[in-house]
Image (cartoon, rainbow, N blue to C red):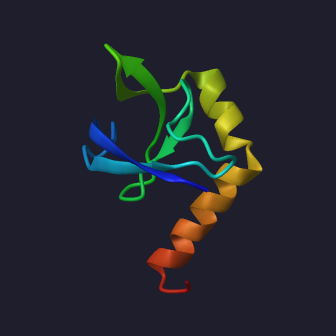
């Protein structure tokens, strides 16, 4: 798992600045186009995209969001976030 710094990327739901990304599936240095972003501030889901060579977030389509919602890894991340907020980690 590798973390990376991001510049000028903001959550589409709460406008919190995302300062980094971490891959939970491999050691990619940077997010792939279409990689899922989960805001640790509000839990907002978006997808990474490139705009003029810089990372940005875009909303997912209904089909993409249904697929993300069915992903066991994503559910695990939300479970960890809930446990961390409840002081259980």
Above-or-below relation of 4 to 76? above
| Position of residue 53 in the picture relative to residue 1 (left or right) | left
- Rendering coords of residue 22 (x, y %): 52, 51
**In screen coordinates, is 32 left or right of 25?**
left
Residue in view at x 26 percent, y 47 percent? 17
| Location of residue 71 by image quarter | top right
Q: Is residue 21 left or right of residue 6?
A: right
Rendering coords of residue 14 (x, y %) = 28, 46
Residue 80 falls in image quadrant: bottom right
Quadrant showing the C terminus: bottom right
- Residue that extends furthest to the top in the rendered view of this protein: 52
Count of residue discs: 0
The residue lying toward the viewer, choosing from 57 and 53, is 53
Residue 78, compared with residue 53, is above or below; it is below
Identify the residue at image location x=35%, y=28%: 56
Q: Give the residue displayed 59% in from the left and 23% down from the top.
A: 62
x, y (%) of residue 16? Answer: 26, 49
Q: Residue at x 67, y 55 (%)?
A: 75
- Which of 51 and 13 lies nearest the eye of the viewer? 51
């Amino acid at each position: 798992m590798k973390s990376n710094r991001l510049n000028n990327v903001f959550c589409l739901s709460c406008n919190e600045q995302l300062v980094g990304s971490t891959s939970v599936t491999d050691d990619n240095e940077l997010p792939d186009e279409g990689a899922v972003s989960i805001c640790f501030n509000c839990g907002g889901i978006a997808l990474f995209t490139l705009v003029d060579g810089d990372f940005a977030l875009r909303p997912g389509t209904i089909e993409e969001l249904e697929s993300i919602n069915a992903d066991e890894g994503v559910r695990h991340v939300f479970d960890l976030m809930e446990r961390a907020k409840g002081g259980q980690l």
